[in-house]
Image (cartoon, grey):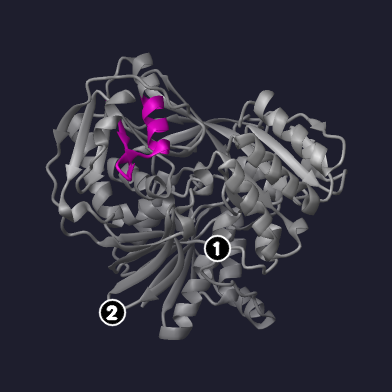
Amino acid sequence: MKILVALKQVPDTETKIKVAADGRSLDPADVKWITSPYDEYALEEALRLKEAKGAEVVAVSVGEEKAKDILRNALALGADQAVLLKSQEAGEPLAVAQIVASFAEGKGFDLLLFGNKGFGSDNGAVGPMVAEKLGAAQANLVTKLELGEGSFRAEREGDSGTEIVEGSLPAVITAQRGLNEPRYASLKGIMAAKKKPIEEVEAVSVAAAARVSSLSLPPARSEGRKLDGDAATQASTLLGLLKNEAKVL
Amino acid sequence: MILVFCELKDGKVRKPSLEALSEARRLADASGKQVGAIFAGHGLAGAEEAATYGADVILKADAPGLAAYSSDGFARLLADAVQAKGASVFLAAATSLGRDVAPRVAARLGAGFAADVTALAMKDGKLQATRPVYAGKAFASVDFESPVQVATTRPNVFAVASCSKAGTAESLPVSADGFKAVVKEILAKAGGAVDLTEADIIVSGGRGMKEGANFKLLEELAEALGGVVGASRAAVDAGWGIPHSMQVGQTGKVVSPTLYIACGISGAIQHVAGMSSSKYIVAVNKDPEAPIFKLADYGIVGDLFEVVPELTKAAKTLKG
């Protein structure tokens, strides 16, 4: 079996967001870059499948030179191959999907694993877009995955409960928290990864279909009022305010 | 035409779909376009309701083979309808289904895509979207280059507005076979609770709840107010048996209810990112210095184990 895992390098989730001088991107000063948290579940699932059934795991990332860090980490965790698809279009979902799909096309991947969204841009679009480009089945927000002969069964988070999705391989699966518990890299893995190559491929050139024209911070909320009295007084004051002042009840 | 994918539940159009439809009507009026509401499934009872919310045309893809949702199958028929109608904008609510299908539709059409938008406008004949990024810590304006533009609208943000239009019904030709993946079964949530992202009122608990069993107090308050219960990451990670699907925050759900009541939640940046766009925020916490009070409209400094039952009592009295 051959598995592709797509990884995105994103700012650490605790990052304080500052707008860069161009007014439309994140100020990269003091930003610590990490593997998007949901992508870690995707990689872990690939590694577990490799251990259970045997598989070749190829980690890819679309981005610039610095994205090699997360690919190196993927090798340390157990990916067999790591490929950097060099492009500056790391933010626009359709362009990224086109790049990943062009790379994957014809390489015989049975499974393509993604995080359900990349932290930051939060579109949750690249996985489904790659599925469409490749004409593959998909299941998003997956919390449990089972593979059969040329088929899969996935549990995903739906609005009214857990949905059971069944489909054929090849398939795109996007991982949700709960799918597994990602491992940490061992020292041995980290040392071995230093010697492994990271392939670099110039990504196909694609025109962005959408662009961020400005980035701004949300208006700050002002501190409201604290309510006095004992618990019963506070409770009745609050309900009164919610009904008569806020008019939300 | 602006085409809006609408979902039905229990014979009614789902509220997030009505919000998308109402916004489509506003955009269409501003740009001289028509609004089409498109439904897919089997039976589709209740689809006519879309006319009351501004649909000039109601398109129905109705076949037994569409009774169960298929990502690839639905994407194909929706994209085909966009092309058949020459629509330039395709909208869906950012429900679990909308999020699943809309990016696929966009890819099929080579269209630019913006998820979970909180404002839309038409500029030079094209859509322009505002959307939260970094889990709500910032907002991005998105301009489109592609001839067709696709977006999903965040639930609870756009106002539902009645506006009667013709709603001319039209059946779409459907080939409901060759689907690559299908939803076989839905294991319904207990009590058929509304999803957090659609809830008007959310009562959330954090580390201060001390143990999972104490969430009963929040359930009682939520029930009295007609809301649902959420949790902070600290509560979900504490091993109290609180499922991740209840988590509000950066790595959980991003919500915009009318009223958000945070109980025993300190207000870590990770949590705030997921709820700071709520219309009204109430904080109940025994620590007067808790950062959550900085963004709460109304703060109660006190022991939640005393305050929450009193709130439930007062809510029951109020609702009579």
- Please say whether residue B110 is visible from this viewpoint: no
Residue for point 41% across, 80% down: A55
The magenta-colored residue range is B1-24
* Quadrant of res A78: bottom right
Residue A187, placed above or below residue A98: below
User: Separation of disc 1 and disc 2 at Cα?
Assistant: 26 Å
**Callout 2 secondary element:** loop
The circle on residue B187 is: none
Percent x, y of residue B265: 75, 50
Q: x and y percent of residue B90 in the render?
A: 33, 34
User: Quadrant of the rendered structure where residue B124 is?
Assistant: top left
Task: Indicate left or right for A212 with B242 as reference.
Answer: left
Q: Is residue B16 magenta?
A: yes
Q: Residues within 10 Å of mark 1 (few under 14, many from 20)?
A: many
Q: Nearer the viewer, residue A201 or A145?
A: A145
Nearer mark to the viewer, of 1 and 2? 1
Q: Give the labeled residue for mark 2.
A: A149
The residue identified by callout 1 is A177
Residue at 67% across / 65% down in the picture?
B213
Amino acid type of the residue tagged 2 in the rendering: Glu
